[in-house]
């Protein structure tokens, strides 16, 4: 999974007391081994979405939208296919007290 190295890099900058959700969509369970679990603060709940057909089955945005909102002013980092990013970003505009949202869209599937 191409996003996991970026996730690993972002985890290094999190404070030890960070709390929230780490939602990662992967194609197979084997991809879980790519995450540097030692960098994940204890307060982050890892949610693995196994999706063998990410180009046709959209699970990422649905999973994020269903998560309970935590108290505080979150900084949110999202990297996903454009359609998923737009859904999640729209959802965040309805939520209170967001400090910062960073959205990165990526092209997936056949681009020919």
Image: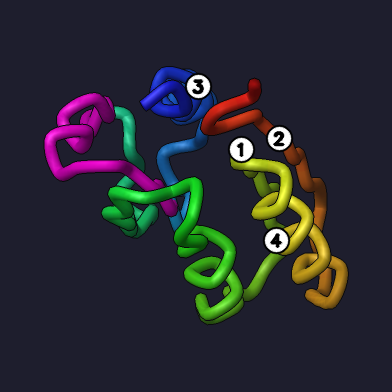
Specify few, some or many for label 3: CA neighbours under 10 Å numbering under 14, 14-19, or 20 or more: few
The Cα–Cα distance between marks 2 and 1, rounded to whole angstroms, is: 6 Å
Q: Residue at x 76, y 70 (%)?
A: 91
The quarter in which the C terminus is drawn is top right
**Is the residue marked by circle 1 packed among few (<14), some (14-19), or many (20+) residues within 10 Å?**
some
The reply to whether callout 3 and callout 2 are in contact (CB within 8 Å) is no
- State the extent of the magenta-drawn residues as a range: 23-38
The residue wearing badge 2 is 105
Residue at mark 4: 88
Magenta span contains residue 36: yes
Query: In percent of the image, x 50 and y 46: which residue is there?
Result: 55
Q: Residue 59 has which mark?
A: none
Indicate which disc, 3 or 2, sits on the residue closer to the N terminus: 3
Residue 58 higher or lower than 53, as above or below:
below
- Decide which of 71, 8 is in the foreground and name it: 8
The mark nearer the N terminus, 4 or 2, is: 4
Contact, mark 3 vs mark 1 (Cβ under 8 Å):
yes
Badge nearest the viewer, 4 or 3: 4
Q: Earlier in the sequence, mark 2 or mark 1?
A: 1
- Can see residue 111? yes
Q: What residue is shown at x 44% (from left), y 48% (from top)?
A: 54
Helix, strand or loop at label 4? It is: helix
Q: Please tell me which of labels 3 and 1 falls first in the chain.
A: 3
Furthest-right residue in this view: 93
Residue sitting nearer the eye, 42 or 81:
81
Do the residues bearing badges 2 and 1 touch, measured as CB atoms within 8 Å?
yes
Please give the residue where the numbered disc 1 appears in the rendered image: 79
Q: Return the residue at label 3.
A: 6
Residue 111 x/y as whole percent: 64, 24
């Amino acid at each position: 999974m191409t996003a996991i190295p970026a996730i690993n890099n972002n985890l290094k900058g999190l404070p030890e007391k960070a709390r929230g959700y780490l939602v990662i969509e992967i194609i197979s369970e084997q991809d879980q081994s790519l995450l540097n679990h030692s960098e994940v603060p204890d307060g982050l709940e890892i949610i693995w979405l196994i999706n063998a057909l990410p180009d046709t089955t959209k699970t990422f945005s649905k999973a994020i939208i269903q998560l309970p909102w935590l108290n505080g002013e979150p900084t949110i980092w999202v990297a996903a296919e454009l359609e998923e990013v737009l859904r999640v970003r729209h959802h965040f505009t309805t939520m209170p007290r967001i400090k910062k949202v960073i959205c990165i869209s990526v092209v997936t599937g056949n681009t020919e």
